Amino acid sequence: MVNRKIPVLYIRKEECCGCTACYAICSKEAISMVEDEEGFEYPQIDENKCVRCYQCINVCPIKGSKV
Ligand code: SF4
Ligand code: SF4
């Protein structure tokens, strides 16, 4: 639990379908959905608000099982 890193919600955009589940579950409001140049929204984590609880990773339908 010590020095856990900020979770990586996606590296490539294919790893995120923009479902906003991570955004919805974050109780710290550390995630915002940010539009890319094509108008698709992707989550962005505010490192200052994130408490590294990893709820967002666990809820993600694409990568939840990896953590
Ligand atoms: S790890 Fe927790 S606090 Fe950080 S962005 Fe994910 S849900 Fe929010
Ligand atoms: S839960 Fe996963 S797929 Fe859904 S918006 Fe967040 S990172 Fe993308």
Image (tube, grey):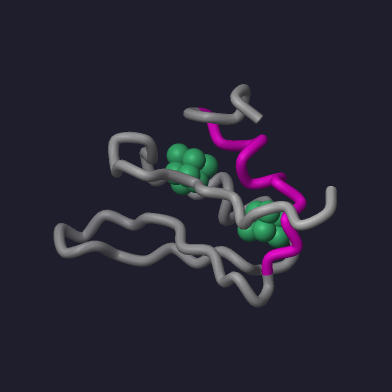
Instruction: Identify the residue at the far bottom of this view.
Output: 48
Indicate the quadrant containing the C terminus: top left, top right, bottom left or bottom right: top right
Q: Residue at x 76, y 57 (%)?
A: 3
Q: How many marks?
A: 0
Q: Is residue 26 visible?
A: no
Instruction: Note whether 26 is above or below 11 in the view shown.
Output: below
Residue 51's x, y, as percent?
75, 63
Tell whether 63 sits left or right of 12. Answer: right
Q: Which span is picked out in magenta?
A: 50-61
Instruction: Identify the residue at the far top of this view.
Output: 65
In this view, the residue in front, 46 or 36, is 46
24 within the magenta span: no
Instruction: Identify the residue at the far right of this view.
Output: 1
Image quadrant, ligand 1 = bottom right
Q: Residue at x 70, y 46 (%)?
A: 54
For residue 10, which quarter of the picture?
top left
Q: Residue at x 37, y 39 (%)?
A: 17
Instruction: Note whether 64 is above or below 27 in the view shown.
Output: above
Residue 50's x, y, as percent?
68, 65
Q: Residue at x 16, y 64 (%)?
A: 37
59 within the magenta span: yes
Q: Is residue 15 visible?
A: yes
Tell whether 50 sits left or right of 21. Answer: right
Residue 13's x, y, as percent?
29, 43
Residue 57's x, y, as percent?
61, 40
